[in-house]
Amino acid sequence: MITEHPHATHAALAAHIAAALRSAITQRGQATLAVSGGKSPIALFEALRTQPLDWAQVTVILVDERVVPHNHADSNTALVRQHLLQDAAAAARFVLFFDEPPPALSAVVLDALAAQANQRLADLPWPLDVVVLGMGEDAHTASLFPGAPGYARALVSTDKLAWVVPNTAPHARLSLTLPSLLESRELLLSIAGAAKRAVYRQATEKADTTLPISLVLNQSQTPVSVWIA
């Protein structure tokens, strides 16, 4: 089921996320939040980090991460540390997929890195309470890039996380798999701009593996709220 929030603001989305996390803490004593990287969510992170919330009871993970050092300009870990885990949100627990990646990557190395990350994620309480997704103009979400090596496995794997090597973007990625995303209690998709709105409208028509976000939108397992700026 899709619920649309047109003319959405970062403040409204931050308040919605905080309310969901508060509810989870009240019901289960803790909350889990998965967030996407890139530049788009920076304003959301800066609005969310000041929300009144028992952040010490919140565990934060990434939806996906580039396999780069944590001080790399493209690191989602660095982005979350700089823009979300500040102010009140500094009290949250942040679970990393990996400490530092090896210098040379191969399928064997990525398998090992993904296995290590899956061991870390296994210790979290599942399902995740709130997952914040973004979407590219190629309809990718998380690091589910259409046609990329690892993509087909990430659509069906029973692991929480898998590796994908995008054909159209730099760096190998570790990403939550489609089944683990759909296992969540609530999925949020935040989009902005005419181009992404057009891709989103196309993706709502039917599930299509060439449009990864459509696999999230055209399912009945987990509610999806779409925040359209």
Image (cartoon, grey):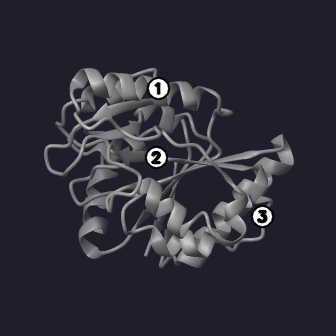
Reading the image, the residue beneath label 2 is 63
Amino acid type assigned to the residue bearing label 1 in the image: Gln
* SS for callout 2: loop
Give the camera-side residue of 117 and 159. 117
Spatial CA distance of label 1 from label 2 is: 16 Å
Comparing labels 1 and 3, the label whose residue is closer to the camera: 1
Does label 1 or label 2 sit earlier along the sequence? 2
Residue lying at 23% horizontally and 24% vertically, measured from the top left: 107
Is the C terminus in the top left, top right, bottom left or bottom right quadrant?
bottom left
Disc nearer the start of the sequence (3/2): 3
Q: Which comes sooner in the sequence, label 1 or label 3?
A: 3
> Residue 208 appears at what percent x and percent y?
25, 39
Q: Residue at x 52, y 69 (%)?
A: 83
Is 198 located above or below residue 121 in the figure?
below
x, y percent for residue 198: 25, 65
| Residue labelled with disc 1 | 116
Mark carried by residue 53: 3
Q: Residue furthest left?
A: 167
Task: Please say if the residues under marks 1 and 2 sit with CB atoms less than 8 Å apart.
Answer: no
Q: Is residue 49 left or right of residue 134?
A: right
Left or right, 210 with reference to 17: left
Q: Which residue is drawn at 55% across and 40% down?
A: 222
